[in-house]
Amino acid sequence: MKISELLKKDTLSLSFEVFPPKTETAFESVKTATEEIAKLKPSFMSVTYGAGGGTSKYTLNIAKNIKELYGVPTLAHLTCVSSSKDMVHQKIEEIKAAGITNVMALRGDIPAHLEDADRSGWDYQHAVDLIYELKKADTDFCIGGACYPEIHPESPNQKEDIKHLKEKVDAGCDFLTTQMFFDNNLLYNFLYKIREAGITVPIIPGIMPITNANQVERSIKLSGSFMPQRFKCLVDKFGSDPAAMKQAGIAYATDQIIDLYANGITNIHVYSMNKPDVARKIQGNLSDILGK
Ligand code: FAD
């Protein structure tokens, strides 16, 4: 099932994200966690991809398993940074062979050891290059792209960032999923600006439930997201009590989702991070709204 079709629903639906194991030994436990999440029957599940290919072989394994065992549509992420054309072509063939039609086309973060490297000779500079490649390989792919309500960290300004976002959409992105954010007003402001720039594809807000205090620093460093005072207070109050922090983080994410839905957004992606209990609790908190 194509995600672009699923996004036409006008009632609230949740999708969940999982990530593949980094090692063979962790494979079984990750597989079990992703299956537990699949049993919740989300609208779809996305499986991330290690930029540079580190965990790449497991992405398709996990995505195929969820789709075939639980009938949950899957979105396989793929990055292109520092990859050769041959590597990307091979991955695209593997995606097709696995029967996966939804692909999240990403550049990926520049690996730290290559930050100062001369990138001019790389086969892929930006996600848009991968989108062209996917379209060339199979016009039937449903393609997602990433977007940044608080601006991509490498962008000089929002205008420039939105200009390049429009290029991705014009190249064939069917929908966009946002980076995490903790203040919904930032999302509403972003939506206004991208619609004004002529980007009309569906936007799926990405919500990250923060369930422990260590995650706060890690997530902010990775995403550069703004932490509202309301969220900081919550971390100050509950950060040293793991059970309370988890409950408060899930409540905060639930509240964000309810506000988004009340403001007309129907499809929301939850960065559930291989945590079935977190996915289950968020879904449970919304059971009457979701009709589940
Ligand atoms: P791009 O769209 O290429 O943008 C990167 C930067 O380049 C931006 O600043 C953009 O404005 C600029 N740019 C784009 N085109 C041009 C151009 N023609 N000229 C000049 N500048 C340009 N990472 C992973 O490794 N694996 C994952 O599975 C993964 N999943 C993600 C899912 C989501 C929803 C999000 C939001 C991020 C994800 N990431 C993942 C992180 C992502 O790879 C990084 O944020 C990366 O730095 C940018 O990827 P992109 O696809 O947005 O890049």
Image (tube, grey):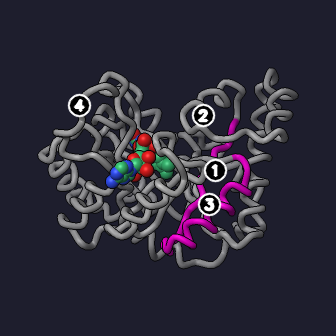
Q: Position of residue 6 (x, y in %)?
A: 50, 73
**Residue labelled 4 has its Cβ within 8 Å of some atom of ligand 1:** no
Residues in magenta, as a range: 182-210
Would you place residue 255 above or below residue 196 in this image?
above
Hey, what amino acid is under mark 3?
Phe
Image position, residue 142 (x, y; %) = 35, 68
Asked where in the image residue 272 lies, by quadrant, the reply is top right
Whole-angstrom CA distance, mark 4 to mark 2, is 29 Å
Q: For the view shown, which residue lies furthest in the left direction?
A: 86
* Quarter of the figure that contains the N terminus: bottom left
> Distance of mark 4 from mark 1, alpha carbons?
35 Å
The reply to whether the residue tagged 2 has its Cβ within 8 angstroms of ligand 1 is no
Q: Is residue 99 magenta?
A: no
Q: Amino acid at mark 2?
A: Ser
Kindly state the secondary structure of the residue where label 4 is placed.
loop
Residue designated by label 2:
219
Whole-percent x and y of residue 68? Answer: 37, 59
Q: Decide which of tag 2 and tag 1 comes sooner along the chain.
A: 1
Q: Give the residue pinned by disc 4.
A: 118
Residue 192, numbered circle: none
- Does the numbered disc 3 mark a residue whose Cβ is under 8 Å from ligand 1? no
Closer to the camera in the image, 11 or 164: 164
Residue 74 seen by the camera: no
Which label sits in the foreground, 3 or 1? 3
Between 251 and 179, the one nearer to me in the picture: 179
Q: CA distance from mark 3 to mark 1?
A: 15 Å
